[in-house]
Amino acid sequence: MYSRVFFNSGSVTLSANGTGLMDWYDASIGGNLLYTGNNFTTPPLMNTTTYYVEDRSVSPLFYTGKNDSTGSGGYFGSSGNIHYEIFNCYEPMLLKSVKVYAEYDGNRTILLRDSSKATLQSLTVFIPQGESRVNLNFDLPVQNKLQLVGYGVPDLFRNNNGSASYPYILSNYITITESSASLPPYNVNGNYYYFYDWEVQEKPCTSPRVPVVATIHDCSGIDNNENLSKFMLYPNPAENEFTIEFNNDKPEDYNIIIYDLIGKIIFNKRFVTLNGINKQHVNCSVFEKGVYVVQIQGASQNHYKKIVIQ
């Protein structure tokens, strides 16, 4: 778990590093993707909030299928003759997008089906006239004879008369073996239907999510802690050095932690107190001018107090 402490309400920048892309969520499982990147700036916060970050590896993009519509052919659409490309998938893949050529603007339905023609995924999308790229983001299972289908009356360009050269092989991943017009009653190997220049990618691998906590302390009440008379900072304001003094009724391990106002720890020292008055001197000559928060952290006491460095 990572934690950042800051004071008063406001935004804070949380950081994480990994080998891939860092995705930030508002839940440990599921939830909403809030941001992708190493440094996430939260919205203004009033209360301590936990975020979750995961490391997502991204593989390169690959391309397969007929590159474009070069060759003989024309626009096709017939609800009585549903056509598709047939392919084998050897690894779990993401079919991100395909290139199409539309006769006119309008909605088209594209299906991913298995060999029994059961629909695995479906997308209805507006396609402009002419050449464009359609984002599908279909999850491809490891199966043979999958079908990428132009459903209904697509009126998309398709090649015929031997313009295609099957198979289209993307080694170890996908082989486009034929089209529906290569099957009876057509038996025409060269027909290629609708979907060109397939953009595919191995499915990403993600790490377990790690919680990152933005802890908020209300700076307005920071000088009113219980038993704060036992805790003093002087001189305040300070220039080169200040003294932390507090009273303790038993020996105990303590941490002195000093934060800037966005929660960055700039000083952290552990020591053992004695009975009675304890004093620690802090060299602040290297601190930038500004307001800081000093925390005395122990098993029986945990106090905060502001100090001004000038």
Image (spheres, grey):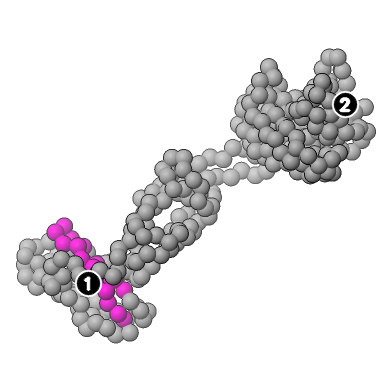
Describe residue 152's horizontal placement relative to residue 274 as left or right. right
Say which label, 1 or 2, has the lower sequence index.
Answer: 2
Q: Which residues are magenta?
A: 292-309
Q: Which residue is mark 1?
A: 223
Q: Which mark is residue 190?
A: 2
Label 2 element class:
loop
Return the x and y of residue 270 as percentages of the image width and height: 22, 64
At x 7%, y 63%, the residue is: 250
- Asked if the stretch drawn in magenta spans residue 138, the answer is no
Residue 307 or 54: which is nearer the viewer?
A: 307
**Residue 97 on image: x %, y %:** 71, 40
Residue 24, given in percent of the width and then of the height, sits at: 48, 50
In the image, what residue type sits under mark 2?
Gly
Residue, x 31% and y 81% (percent of image)?
309
Q: Residues within 10 Å of mark 1 (few under 14, many from 20)?
A: some
Vertical side of 297 occupied by 171: above or below? above
| Residue type (three-letter) at the residue carrying disc 1 | Asp
Is 298 in the magenta?
yes
Discs 1/2, front: 1
Of 257 and 47, nearer the camera is 47
Numbered disc 1: secondary structure:
helix
Q: Residue at x 89, y 38 (%)?
A: 70
Q: Which mark is residue 166?
A: none
Q: Quadrant of the C terminus?
A: bottom left
**Viewed as shown, does residue 114 lie left or right of 246?**
right
Instruction: Assess disc 2: are there few (<14), some (14-19) or many (≥20) residues with their C-alpha within 10 Å of its C-alpha.
Output: some
Residue at the image position 86 percent from the left and 14 percent from the top = 185
* Residue 102 figure quarter: top right
Query: Does residue 271 appear in the picture of this structure?
Result: no
Relative to 128, is 8 above or below? below
